[in-house]
Image (tube, grey):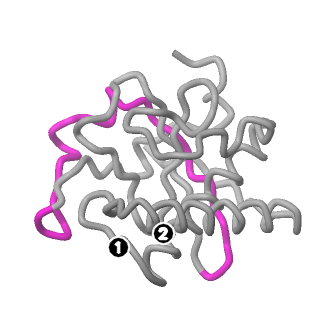
């Protein structure tokens, strides 16, 4: 089975500015509160900001694609178990187009995860999967060492055209 064809997303200047503003806000809040990066990720500095920029941009791309921009960036603080967008959608953005979708072990089985990659200023929305389908033993891996999770290949994803209204 072939993976769904990725959708190339091109940001408007307004979308780019809004995502950047949100990334800088997240970084400032995390540094002021002394919050740690998830799964041993960077906490401060350029690498942490890059992670926030990727995340906010990926969320913007999916929200814009699905017509949900008015629901973006509603939470001012990261909350475990919350979703980025309505319909229980969480966006996971990776820095290389070859990377798989990562789903953590403690996620809600009913949450929907969308894989976005941003590499060399090219943004691709690859598809989605419901967490219970991602949480299979065959996807469990620890490629970085010490940070195991479910790494879902693109061929296991559903096309974006099927996400809204799915259960």
The answer to whether 117 is drawn above or below residue 121 in the figure is above
The residue at which mark 1 appears reads as 42
Q: What element carries label 1?
A: loop
Q: Where is residue 38 in the image (x, y as percent from the top left)?
A: 32, 57
Residue count near mark 1 (Cα–Cα under 10 Å), binned few <14, some 14–19, many ≥20? some
The answer to whether 12 is drawn above or below residue 108 in the figure is below
User: At x 69% / y 54%, what residue is drawn?
Assistant: 7
In the image shown, does 158 or 16 lie closer to the viewer? 16
Q: Does the magenta stretch include residue 31?
A: no
The answer to whether 3 is drawn above or below residue 25 in the figure is above
Q: Position of residue 164 (x, y in %)?
A: 66, 25
Pick whichever of labels 2 and 1 is earlier in the sequence.
1
Q: Where is residue 122 in the image (x, y as percent from the top left)?
A: 67, 73
The residue at which mark 2 appears reads as 51
Q: Quadrant of residue 10?
A: bottom right
Q: In this view, does 88 lie to the left or right of 130?
A: right
User: At x 81% / y 60%, what residue is drawn?
Assistant: 15
In the image shown, does 74 or 54 lie closer to the viewer? 74
Q: Is mark 2 on a helix, strand or loop?
A: helix
Q: Where is residue 83 in the image (x, y as percent from the top left)?
A: 51, 34
Residue extending farthest to the front is 32
* Circle number at residue 153: none
Residue count near mark 2 (Cα–Cα under 10 Å), binned few <14, some 14–19, many ≥20? many
Q: In this view, does 18 lie to the left or right of 136?
A: right
Q: Is residue 23 left or right of residue 49?
A: right
State which region is magenta: 120-146
User: At x 57% / y 39%, what residue is drawn?
Assistant: 84
Q: Do the residues labelled 2 and 1 touch (CB within 8 Å)?
A: yes
Q: Does the magenta stretch include residue 124?
A: yes
User: At x 78% / y 42%, what residue is drawn?
Assistant: 69
Quadrant of the image for the N terminus? top left
């Amino acid at each position: 089975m072939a993976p769904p064809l990725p959708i190339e997303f091109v940001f408007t200047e307004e979308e780019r500015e809004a995502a950047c503003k949100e990334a800088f806000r997240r970084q400032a809040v995390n540094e002021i509160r002394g919050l740690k990066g998830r799964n041993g990720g960077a906490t401060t500095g350029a690498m942490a900001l890059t992670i926030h920029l990727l995340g906010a941009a990926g969320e913007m791309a999916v929200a814009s694609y699905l017509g949900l921009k008015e629901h973006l960036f509603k939470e001012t603080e990261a909350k475990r178990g919350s979703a980025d967008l309505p319909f229980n959608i969480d966006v996971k953005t990776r820095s290389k187009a070859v990377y798989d979708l990562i789903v953590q072990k403690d996620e809600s089985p009913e949450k929907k995860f969308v894989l976005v990659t941003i590499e060399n200023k090219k943004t691709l929305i690859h598809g989605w999967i419901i967490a219970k389908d991602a949480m299979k033993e065959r996807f469990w891996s620890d490629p970085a060492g010490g940070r195991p999770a479910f790494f879902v290949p693109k061929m296991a994803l559903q096309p974006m055209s099927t996400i809204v209204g799915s259960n």
